[in-house]
Amino acid sequence: MKSKQSTSVTRRCWYRIQGGPPLATPKVYDRVQTLLMFIGYPRSGHTLVGSLIDAHPNAIIANELDIIGSWLEWNEDNRNKYFLFDQLYKNSHEQAIKGYRSRFNEYVMQQLFNYSVFRQWQGKFKDAPKVIGDKHGPATTLWLTMRIYGRPTFEQIKAKVNAKVKFIHVIRNPFDNISTMLIRTKKLRHDIERSKGKINDTESLEFEILRYFNLAAGNEVLIEKWRENILEIHSKDLISKPRDTIRRVCNFLDLTCSKQYLDDCASIVYKKPSKTRFRVLWTDKQKQRTLQAIRRFAFLKGYTFESL
């Protein structure tokens, strides 16, 4: 029987079990060296980062399977390395065929951005994956800061997979990150794009500010615990220096990256930051309190309402 606390966290992020035969053999999954998880915030740009890593010939990155939440939902027979890795692979494969990483999905083609990396290896691998994982930053942060269910489950997963566990922490200007969280929560993305207007909802903005800094506080705890196993990526660096940033990711994951891979990944990175802070009406008090909160976190140092 699931606990109320467990259910409340997993309800939005649990990914359905994908049936059918395994997509790879146990011998292939035994060659995985690193399990990768993301920590962070919704709307930070980590969907792009996960898609770029998934394009590497020796990496498989699922999109929001939610490793810890799914593990808790699965029965005991499925709580093993091979089932987990196969679910991650099937998720990645589905994303490349008909999800956010598909070049031919009509829904995705209507969106403002497509995460398909042409000529590369999204949803598949060459020889064997060295890295396998999942992109779901906020869910992972929430689970890992829960001492009762999240942390013990994570330790169980670590023991079962028998691989190094690494994390990526994607950071965007908090004013833009929070603004985009508000826009998406209120489902006003396309309306805002068409009208070029501003959202005036002080109460909802307050909620998103609190939500963001609760996650930031959780990430600070995780960084203190696992600093050497966490790579910090700033969205502004990915945009201004895509090849250098992607190369840093590959080095962190012990992956060799070719010039073609770097060029193909760099070709889909945004050309400039999306400054959604100007699509939301921020009061002077909200700006000031957010700036004060930013200064409490080393990984947010230097961000202001005016900066990138």
Image: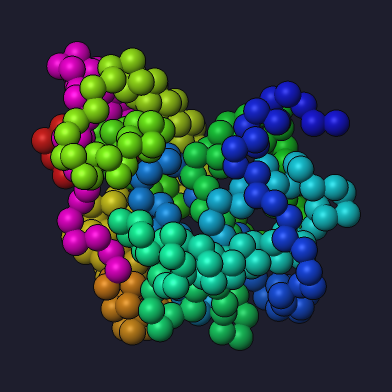
The vertical placement of 247 against 156, above or below, is below
Whole-percent x, y for residue 215 in the image: 45, 31
Instruction: Decide whether residue 289 is among the magenta residues.
Output: yes
Quadrant (top left/top right/bottom left/bottom right) for the C terminus = top left
- The residue under the point 70% across, 47% down is 70
> In this view, which residue lies farthest toward the left?
306
Which span is picked out in magenta? 268-297
Residue 250 appears in the rendering: no
- The residue under the point 19% across, 30% down is 198
The vertical placement of 228 against 86, above or below, is above
Whole-percent x, y for residue 255 in the image: 47, 74
Whole-percent x, y for residue 116 in the image: 40, 70
- The residue under the point 42% across, 39% down is 41
Examine the image and state in which quarter residue 97 appears. bottom right
Examine the image and state in which quarter residue 283 appears. top left
Number of marks present in the image shown: 0
Near-viewer residue (295 or 134)? 134
Residue 86 appears in the rendering: yes
Whole-percent x, y for residue 65 in the image: 61, 52
